[in-house]
Amino acid sequence: MPYSPPPRKLPSTERRERQFLYLHEVDALVAAMRQTRAPIRNQALVMLLFCQALQPSEICWLRWCDLNKAARTLLVVRNRSKSLRIQPQVVVNQQPLCPAEIEILQALVNTCKTDWILESERQQRLSDRSLHHIVQQAGVLAGLPIPVHPYMLRRSGLYYRAALLLQGANLSLHECCLLWNYYVTSSAMPAEAQIEYQAINRKREETFLLTFEQIKAFSGISSDENVIDYLLGAYLLFPRLPEIPDRYWLAPRNWRLKTLPKTSRTTR
């Protein structure tokens, strides 16, 4: 028989027009999870992916011992490496939970039979593959216009937090790009760009730099180039930052980043 090559995998840009979800689409995913076989677990899954900006390899390894009910925080191990030969330092964060997360986790703990927060029907740790399938099917059930995967919830969560942190500075997307170029470019800025930079209030500049460091620490991302993509993504989610809804139900409460003063080279 003649050789038949495998079908070509379509690039992500051809499968979906964007790599994030709007807030109403996050809400639709949560609502769709109520119609699944494990509604409480799957609602918690969506909320944690968005609110804590977790990767699949991070959320699937969460245990109930990571939850501090009294402090209402979650211990998150970032940058979990799948390679056995490469063990980079990982970031360990103590991250606050919003009221909706606390409520759903309190309901979930009464149904779980293992130490895994997200357990499968076979009472084992939920696999990354199952996680992707659950989120994808929920997107179809919710009638979303694009195929959905877990990283879109993580990306939207980081965009949302960056938008909240930048909101008070009243910085435009152009000004953020200008500040970023000023701090990473070694070559001299054009005269016009220099004038625009000098016009930015130093307090607003400090807010931009602080937001960058907070998003970097919260996400556990080591590459500055990747961090700035998430920070500037705030303007994809909200082209006008003052239009951020004031009473969004998944908004972080008293969000103060607490990164533990240690790193680890091993994973649980």
Image: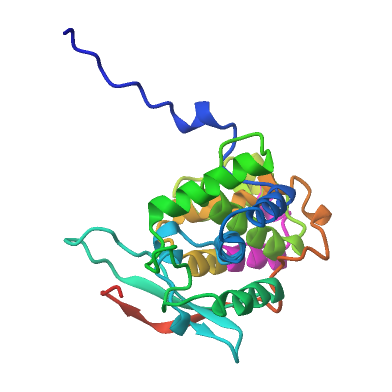
Identity of the residue drawn at 83% across and 53% down:
243
Taking the image as shown, residue 80 lies to the left or right of residue 225, namely left
Q: Nearer the viewer, residue 121 or 231?
A: 121
Considering the image in quadrants, where does the N terminus appear? top left
Which of the 4 quarters of the picture holds residue 9?
A: top left
Residue 153 percent across, percent down from the top left:
57, 53
Observer-nearest of 141 and 82: 141
Instruction: Say which residue appears at 38% left-offset and 66% top-offset.
Output: 125
Q: Residue at x 42, y 74 (%)?
A: 116
List x then y, in percent, for residue 16: 56, 32
User: From what the image shows, is residue 112 above or below residue 71?
Assistant: above
Task: Please state the extent of the stretch shown in magenta in the rendering.
Answer: 195-212
On screen, residue 1 above or below 17: above
State the residue in front, 183 or 109.
109
Residue 68, relative to residue 149: is it above or below? below
Protein image colouring: rainbow
Q: Specify whether residue 103 is painted magenta.
A: no
Q: Position of residue 232 (x, y in %)?
A: 61, 50
Question: What secondary structure is the stretch in magenta mostly built from?
Answer: helix
- Quarter of the image that includes the C terminus: bottom left
256 relative position to 88: left or right? right
- Residue 215 showing in the rendered view: yes
